[in-house]
Amino acid sequence: MSRFTRFAAMAAALLIGGQALAADPVKVGFVYVGPVGDHGWSYEHDQARKQLEAHFGDKVKTAFVENVAEGADSERVINQFAQQGFDLVFTTSFGFMNPTLKVAKRFPKVKFEHATGYKRTDNVGTYAARFYEGRAVIGTIAGHMTKSNVIGYIAPFPIPEVMRGINAFTIALRAVNPKAEVKVIWTNSWYDPGREREAAETLIAQGADILSQHTDSPAPVQVAQEKGVLAFGQASDMSRFGPDAHLTAIVDDWAPYYTARVQAVIDGTWKPADTWGGFDSGMVVMAPYNDRIPADVLAAAEQMEDAIRTGKHHPFQGPITNQAGEVMVKDGETLGDDKLLSMDWYVQGVQGRLPN
């Protein structure tokens, strides 16, 4: 019996004489691009789903579908949730944006929330985290701790979210170590342990002594542990996969947001919104710091985190130049959200050409 079939049976059992019980639970669906066991992006969304169930108890019923490909397959899954009477559906990958909008148009009474997107309608809201704030913290650590001055960065797709991360990392890196450079390998996948492992090994062979990643498997951390280099995890605390290598990670904490949005549905106050939270909202947190980080470096990292949280520092405050040496942000200015959301260029210090 499929997950959807089981849920349909439970929903049918709550009907008496064709009338729903007064205490019908709010039905919340989640669509994941990767497996819940990726220990990264989808894993953290599913951890938040579990916390949602624990918080609301029998007031909510949740279901999820994992490993959903971006494109036609995601539209089919999203549509299936809507057809089966779900009240709220979270679609959790950038490539789910247009499929979400298509289904939302067909089901105007169903509420949808799309992660990392920018298109909204009367029944579609958007949400994301300012991951780039965490990248500035780990870039600071990398700048202090690299000995080879080569940092490896494993990236999935050249979309603005990923570009912001690479650039924020590099800006912070070179602020403390102007000689350091970043080498990027693109995997063209959010989750592919084989490709991620190969990319990590290649970067180490090219001289990288620290690895960072925007991909979702712990493979790069495992390679770093095996090869005796350092690494940062992605989306969750990956220290168990490389206790010596893993310095920290940017953790995505979605639970408070999901709880608030489901509560809004229960209260009848839900409206589509655009949420972009960072350190100050608790949507972005840092995993525990490895004891290998020297005290002065740890202090610098914590100072950066605190400065960003309190608004004293912005990861994209000028002066900032691109690869060609052109000034993109003047001294004393800060890159606005509109420019961050459309970022398609490398800052100075990133090696290689941006893929088309």
Image: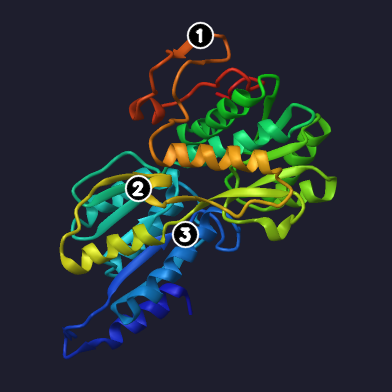
Give the percent coordinates (x, y) of residue 246.
70, 50
Q: Is residue 164 above or below residue 231?
A: above
261 left or right of 243 in image = left
Looking at the image, tell me whether mark 3 or mark 2 is earlier in sequence order: 3
Measured as percent of width and height from the top left, residue 343 is found at 44, 26
- SS of the residue under disc 3: helix
Residue 28's label in the rendered image is: none
Q: Distance between the residues labelled 3 and 2?
A: 13 Å
- The kind of residue on which mark 3 rests is His
- Tell me the distance, in whole angstroms, between the alpha carbons under discs 2 and 1: 32 Å
Is the residue under label 2 in contact with that under label 3 (CB below 8 Å)?
Answer: no
Of 244 and 260, the residue lying toward us: 244
Q: Mark 1 points at which residue?
A: 326
Q: How crowded is mark 1: few (under 14 residues within 10 Å), some or many (20 or more)?
A: few
Tag 1's secondary structure?
A: loop
Q: Is residue 126 left or right of residue 321?
A: left
Residue type marked 1: Glu
- The residue sitting at the bottom extreme is 17
From this viewpoint, is residue 212 visible?
A: no
Mark 2–mark 1 CB contact (< 8 Å): no
Residue 323: x, y in percent? 58, 14
Secondary structure at badge 2 equals strand
Label 3 environment density (alpha carbons within 10 Å; few <14, some 14–19, many ≥20): many
Image mark for residue 127: 2
Q: Which residue, given by chain and number where applicable, does mark 3 sit on?
A: 45
Residue at (37% x, 60% y) in the render: 256
Q: Is 272 or 277 nearer to us in this picture? A: 277
Q: Can I make out residue 43 in this image?
A: yes
The local crowd at label 2, few if under 14, some if 14 to 19, many if 20 or more residues have their Cα within 10 Å, is many
Residue at x-position 23% and y-position 60%: 110
- Residue 7 in the image: x percent, y percent? 38, 78
